Image (cartoon, rainbow, N blue to C red):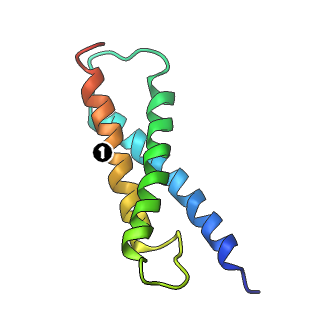
Amino acid sequence: METSIGAENWIGIAVWIVTGAVVALAMKVAVRLPHTTAGHTAVLVVLGIFGAVVGGMLGVGIAEFNSPFPRALSIGGMAGAVALSGFITWVYRWGIRNFT
């Protein structure tokens, strides 16, 4: 059974979303705060997902630039998703530590 490129790209975007949520929760564990306020986990996960989707698109755009059929589930897309979601969630965790 063959899948179309569009279906593969949607699966890749779904993988980016899950990756962003996992990276956000890992960042919550890595950057400990003395006390947390309710709602920070939800904001962190949303920022991780946002970073993963934008980073994945940038990674695909950079890594698959000359490809006639760029795929979301590629090394460039995954690297961009992990890198940008990690950076955005780290900045959020690092930035709110002085306000909580």
Q: Amino acid at mark 1?
A: Phe
Depth check: give the residue in front, 38 or 11: 11
Depth check: give the residue in front, 69 or 73: 69
Rendered residue at 40%/47% (across/down): 23
Rendered residue at 33%/36% (across/down): 29
**In this rendering, is residue 89 above or below 19?**
above
Q: Is residue 88 left or right of residue 39?
A: left
Q: Position of residue 26 (x, y in %)?
A: 37, 43
Query: Residue 37's image quarter?
Result: top left
Depth check: give the residue in front, 38 or 89: 89
Residue at the spot of label 1: 87
Q: Is residue 78 left or right of residue 42?
A: left
For the N terminus, the image quarter is bottom right
Q: Position of residue 45 (x, y in %)?
A: 48, 37
Rendered residue at 36%/64% (across/down): 79
**In this rendering, is residue 9 above or below 70?**
above
Q: Is residue 52 left or right of residue 14?
A: left
Number of residues whose C-alpha sits closer than 10 Å to that of mark 1, classed few (under 14), some (14–19) or many (20 or more) = some
Rendered residue at 38%/47% (across/down): 85
Q: Secondary structure at mark 1?
A: helix
Q: Position of residue 16 (x, y in %)?
A: 51, 57
